Amino acid sequence: MRSLLLSLALTALPACRQDTSAASLSTHRLRFIATLDGAAANCKSLAAPPFRLRDARLFVSELRVIGPDGETPAAFVPDSRFQSVEVALLDFEDATEGCEGDSAEHTELVFEAPVSSVRAVTFTVGIPFALNHQNPALARAPLTAGAMHWGWRGGYKFVRIEAQRDGVEGRIHLGSTGCEGALHAITSCAHPNRGTVHLELDPATQQVALDLGAFFGSDKGGDKTDCMGEPADPSCHAGYRAIGAAGKEAARQSDSLAANTTNPAMGASAFTVIRRTP
């Protein structure tokens, strides 16, 4: 039954290749690791000044893979917490040493695609329009993560990075802004603020490093960084560059039910490919 659902989901997505029968699907795993200054980072390793991690979570969607025969859409393997077929939540915090959230982490995307091996992946940092602005009370996991909902924006935080740097709290919250309509009935957003990440890699031998420092850019420790998603806010510029949705480009986008667009890739400076460790 699960393979049938995934096959139907793949068929519904735009693709360069249409061989999406359940029998042709293979399961793949793409591992992520949070880093800071080139070293692995987590709540325990970043529990003391100058950089104390508080939170590190982000949504990804619209996964596509390149295999031996070209590009094709992929579908996340659903679980009860972090992945639906369409959206996955990467969660790098475990609620220790002052971090928020709870003990459960999710740092590996599990997905199915009609390819035997993966040579590259492309994904969106963010949530598709219709899912982003649904009633969270009716949502299914992973869109049940309360800390990631952005009630006053009418949608979800695509990225939630929080840290105390040299004793000053900093927040990077990224998501769609300038949205019109009532809560749970948003009709358009002036700034979708979804980023695109493209990485050439072999998930069997390589993993993706997420540089937490990239979200703060050149802001120095001790400077207050309080980004609430506005593309024109200088404290948000580094964050949007980090996910491949630079502020100036994001500001020129339009998002609505009729025209649901994704920002062009702008480098996605927070994501790099490194050797996979055991």
Image (tube, grey):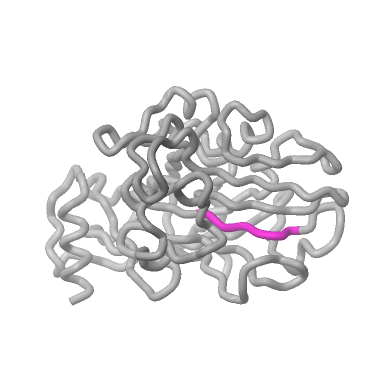
Question: Considering depth in this image, is 135 or 6 the residue closer to the camera?
Answer: 135
Q: Is residue 170 left or right of residue 147?
A: right
Above/below status of 210 relative to 240: below
Count of numbered badges drawn on the protein: 0
The quadrant holding residue 253 is top left
Q: Relative to 242, does residue 22 appear above or below in the rendering?
A: below
Residue 20 placement (x, y as % from top left): 15, 58
The N terminus lies in which quarter of the figure? bottom left
Work out whether 154 lies above or below 191. Answer: below
Left or right: 84, with 24 as reference point: right
**Residue drawn at (87%, 51%) of the image:** 167
- Residue 26 image point, x, y percent: 26, 66
Image quadrant occupied by the C terminus:
bottom right
Residue 154 in the figure: left or right of residue 3: right
Q: Position of residue 66 (x, y in %)?
A: 30, 48
Residue 190 visible in the picture: yes
**Magenta highlight range:** 53-58
- Percent coordinates x, y for residue 222 in the rendering: 86, 42
Q: Main secondary structure of the magenta part?
A: strand
Residue at coordinates 43% horizontally, 36% vertically from top-left? 179
Q: Nearer the viewer, residue 152 or 80?
A: 152
Name the residue at 53% across, 59% down: 32
Answer whether residue 196 is magenta in the image.
no
Q: Is residue 119 visible?
A: no
Image quadrant of residue 54? bottom right
Q: Residue at x 70, y 36 (%)?
A: 217
Residue farthest along the front direction in this orientation: 182
Q: Is residue 113 left or right of residue 269?
A: left
